[in-house]
Image (tube, rainbow, N blue to C red):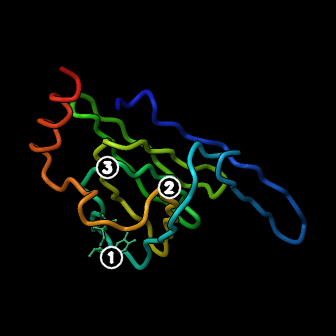
Amino acid sequence: MSLDKVKLISLPKISDPRGNLSFFESGVHIPFEIKRTYWIYDVPGGEIRGSHAFKESQEFIVALSGSFDVILNDGNQEVKYSLNRSYFGLYVPKLIWRRMENFSTNSLALIGTSHEYQVVDYIRNFEKFKLLKNEKES
Ligand code: TYD
């Protein structure tokens, strides 16, 4: 799985003088069924989240409030996405290393994911991740 499968997805935005509304649906705006949703909030300045890859889980990350950076690495290349609008989301396929940093005050990251929480789905060692990627590609 390489970085070319990563996608910044533009979501519907229903502009309204009463306040705007956006949404996403599995299979319509994002290419997988959501099994679980979690969110990251109250991140102290300078903290880093993530720093792992998933063997199977695909994720969709939205900056519901504030801003943060998502740095993705496929074992060869690295790319940084700055998320700062609630009507854009970042699709991250399985087997991509991710790190989230530079959280603004009061930022809120919403993550929809394709699998239930399973410890065994995590790869938390970057060297092991690179070895696994090389095995899969050879
Ligand atoms: P982790 O996925 O490591 O956080 P990060 O997004 O920074 O990589 O999860 C942190 C802790 O929360 C870890 O002990 C596992 C727990 N956790 C759950 O119990 N359920 C979940 O759905 C998630 C995402 C994490």
Q: Which residue does the numbered mark 2 point to in the structure image?
A: 61
> What whole-number distance in Å separates the C-alpha atoms at marks 3 and 2?
11 Å
Q: Residues within 10 Å of mark 2 (few under 14, many from 20)?
A: many
- Of residues 57 and 49, the one nearer the viewer is 57
> Residue 98 bears which disc, if any?
3
- Of residues 61 and 136, the one nearer the viewer is 136
Q: Residue furthest top?
A: 138
Is there a contact, CB below 8 Å, between mark 3 and mark 2? no
The residue at the point 30 percent across, 53 percent down is 99
Question: Mark 2, mark 1: which one is toward the viewer?
Answer: 2
Question: Mark 3, mark 1: which one is toward the viewer?
Answer: 3
The residue at the point 57 percent across, 67 percent down is 65
Quadrant holding ligand 1?
A: bottom left
Residue 17 drawn above or below residue 125? below
**In x, y percent, where is residue 92?**
44, 44
- Of residues 13 and 117, the one nearer the viewer is 117
Q: Residues within 10 Å of mark 1 (few under 14, many from 20)?
A: few
> What whole-number distance in Å separates the C-alpha atoms at marks 2 and 1?
19 Å
Q: Which residue does the numbered mark 1 point to in the structure image?
A: 44
Residue 20 drawn above or below residue 60? below
The amino acid sitting under disc 2 is Ile
